[in-house]
Image: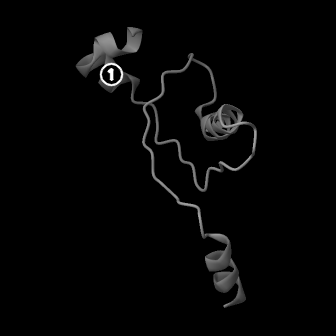
């Protein structure tokens, strides 16, 4: 119960949002690094405060074949 009370007290003024991204990255790069890189980039963009955190991150899998088949021009924008 104490953890729940502490979490409620600390959550005032913050929100958790879900963002879904399809990311184009070089072949051979580890996609599991992306959530951490997004967190770093967001914190750098907002004055380095360290306020932005990835609460949970998941790499769904390689969907290159779907893009090549259905949206080939999107890969080269």
Q: Is residue 57 above or below residue 69?
A: below
Q: Quadrant of residue 68?
A: top left
Q: Say which residue appears at 69% left-offset and 39% top-offset.
A: 43
Query: 9 left or right of 62?
Result: right
Q: Is residue 22 above or below residue 64?
A: below
- Indicate the position of residue 56 as horizontal and vertical percent values: 58, 54
Q: Is residue 58 above or below residue 43?
A: below
Q: Quadrant of the N terminus?
A: bottom right
Q: Quadrant of the C terminus?
A: top left
Q: Say which residue appears at 32% left-offset and 22% top-offset.
A: 67
- Indicate the position of residue 17 as horizontal and vertical percent values: 47, 54
Q: Residues within 10 Å of mark 1 (few under 14, many from 20)?
A: few
Q: Say which residue appears at 58% left-offset and 61% top-offset.
A: 14
Instruction: From the viewer's side, name the closer residue of 12 and 60.
Output: 12
- Which residue is label 1 attached to? 67
Query: 20 left or right of 1?
Result: left
> Among all residues in the image, which is located at the extreme left?
70
Q: Say which residue appears at 64% left-offset and 83% top-offset.
A: 4
- Indicate the position of residue 64 as horizontal and vertical percent values: 40, 23
Which structural element holds mark 1?
helix
Q: Quadrant of residue 10?
A: bottom right
Q: Is residue 14 above or below residue 18?
A: below
- Indicate the position of residue 31 as horizontal and vertical percent values: 59, 32
Instruction: From the viewer's side, name the closer residue of 77 and 7.
Output: 7
């Amino acid at each position: 119960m104490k953890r729940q009370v502490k979490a409620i007290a600390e959550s005032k003024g913050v929100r958790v949002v879900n963002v879904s991204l399809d990311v184009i990255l070089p072949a051979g790069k580890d996609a599991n690094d992306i959530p951490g890189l997004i967190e770093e980039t967001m914190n750098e963009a907002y004055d380095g405060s360290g306020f932005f955190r990835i609460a949970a991150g998941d790499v769904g899998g390689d969907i290159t074949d779907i893009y090549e088949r259905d949206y080939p021009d999107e890969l080269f924008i």
